[in-house]
Amino acid sequence: MKRSLILIVLGFALISFGVMKADAGDEGRIGFVDLQQALLKTTEGKKAKKQLDKEKKSKQKSLDKKQKALQKAAADLEKKKGILNRETLQKKGQELQKRYVELQQLYVKLEKDLAQQQAKLIRKILDKAGPMIEKIAKKGGYTLILDRSAVIWADGNDLTAELIKEMN
């Protein structure tokens, strides 16, 4: 309890000190970029999105084909319900359930693979953006540039368009 109180007081003190220093006006400039927007509007980002969409469409087509086959098998089993004996019906039902679980697992795996591929492509683009952001910061006299997602409110200093221009 005492430690928490000390941390809170220290936090307020640091925030107050930071506000006072920011009011002094000699600390430099702060800007932000919307990396998500930059990813979508740069040539390389558009290319990566197109590649991901193509991959997703291909994997979805494969899943849809397997799902239709599974639905057909379920419909066939339903039709044969009156003909098959109980043991065979139960066995076929279990096989169908097993195929359904395998399809779900495949779906999860493909989603995970797509997410990893997307992260890899984004990382590649962001690695390229880093030096460009640094160049923009130095040219504009910025001491700090944040991602838009980390900014609650800002009045100006949006450098996104400049970043997109640099990256294209």
Image (tube, helix red, strand yellow):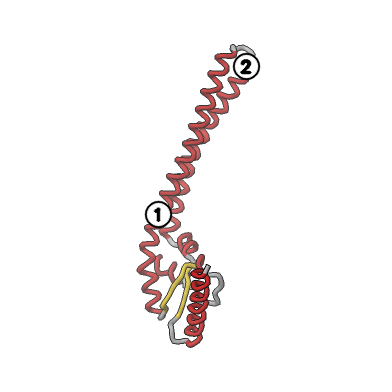
For image coordinates 44% across by 87% down, the residue present is 26
x 45%, y 40%: residue: 109
Residue 81: numbered disc? 2
| Mark toward the viewer: 2 or 1 | 2
Marked residue nearer the N-terminal end (2 or 1): 2
Left or right, 91 with respect to 168, comes to: right
Q: Amino acid at mark 2?
A: Lys
Provide residue 138's location: percent of width, then percent of height: 37, 78
Q: Secondary structure at mark 2?
A: loop
Question: Separation of disc 2 and disc 1 at Cα?
Answer: 50 Å
Q: Residue furthest right?
A: 82
The residue nearer to you, when weighing 5 against 82, is 5
Residue found at x 48% / y 36%: 105
Numbered badge on residue 121: 1
Q: Position of residue 53 (x, y in %)?
A: 47, 48
Badge 1 density bin: few <14, some 14–19, many ≥20, Cα 10 Å? some
